[in-house]
């Protein structure tokens, strides 16, 4: 039995809680993650206890609908006492008025540099959109140069 199946969060794909846990680890430990430079690359890490999904679930409980994992004050590491399930609005200090993140020119360059069609095993537009907390349409329009044409 694979580890993800032991906690019952693999039925019909991954649960939202498990997806948040995977995304947290990706941001902190995988330099290929679009957001790594702002997390792992900036020294943000995950406490040893949370390397186990079961411990993370015990501390954070199930992810409520309409929320994502956020660090309190967007500071410190991912650890008990410093994280909570937050709405887009609560995480919106870097975002626009609609709760979506605003992209920087550097992020747009990264989207274009890291995108590879599935056949070439690069970053998918959907994964980049999720990592950046923007819509798939935004990433798609950047890739097709419908927006951010000047760079």
Image (cartoon, rainbow, N blue to C red):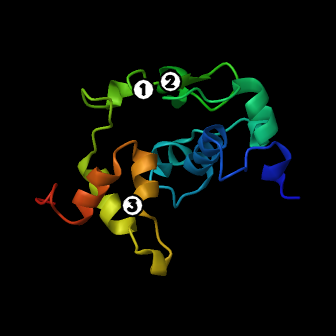
Q: CA distance from mark 3 to mark 1?
A: 22 Å
Residue at point 72% right, 35% down?
47
Residue at point 76% right, 43% down?
51
Q: Which residue is mark 3?
A: 125
The reply to whether the C-beta atoms of the residues labelled 2 and 1 are less than 8 Å apart is yes
Q: Residues within 10 Å of mark 1 (few under 14, many from 20)?
A: many
* As drawn, 9 above or below 76: below
Give the number of marks.
Answer: 3
Which dot, 3 or 1, sits closer to the camera? 3
Q: Secondary structure beneath disc 3?
A: helix
Taking 48 as reference, is 127 left or right?
left
Q: Which residue is mark 2?
A: 86
Q: CA distance from mark 2 to mark 3?
A: 24 Å
Q: Which mark is residue 91?
A: 1
Q: Position of residue 1 (x, y in %)?
A: 89, 58
N-terminal of the pair, mark 2 or mark 3, is 2
The reply to whether the C-beta atoms of the residues labelled 2 and 3 are less than 8 Å apart is no
* As drawn, 39 above or below 93: below
Taking 18 as reference, is 92 left or right?
left
Q: CA distance from mark 2 to mark 1?
A: 6 Å
């Amino acid at each position: 039995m694979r580890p993800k199946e032991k906690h019952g969060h693999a039925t019909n794909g991954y649960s939202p809680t498990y997806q948040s846990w995977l995304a947290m680890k990706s941001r902190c430990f995988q330099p290929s993650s679009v957001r790594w430079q702002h997390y792992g690359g900036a020294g943000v890490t995950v406490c040893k206890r949370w390397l186990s999904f079961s411990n993370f679930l015990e501390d954070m409980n199930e992810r409520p609908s309409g929320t994502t994992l956020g660090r309190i004050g967007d500071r410190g590491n991912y650890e008990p006492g410093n994280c909570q399930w937050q709405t887009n609005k609560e995480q919106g200090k870097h975002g626009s008025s609609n709760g979506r993140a605003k992209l920087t020119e550097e992020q747009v360059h990264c989207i274009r540099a890291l995108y590879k069609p599935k056949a070439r095993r690069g970053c998918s537009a959907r994964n980049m959109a999720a990592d950046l907390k923007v819509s798939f349409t935004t990433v798609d329009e950047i890739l097709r140069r419908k927006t951010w044409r000047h760079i």
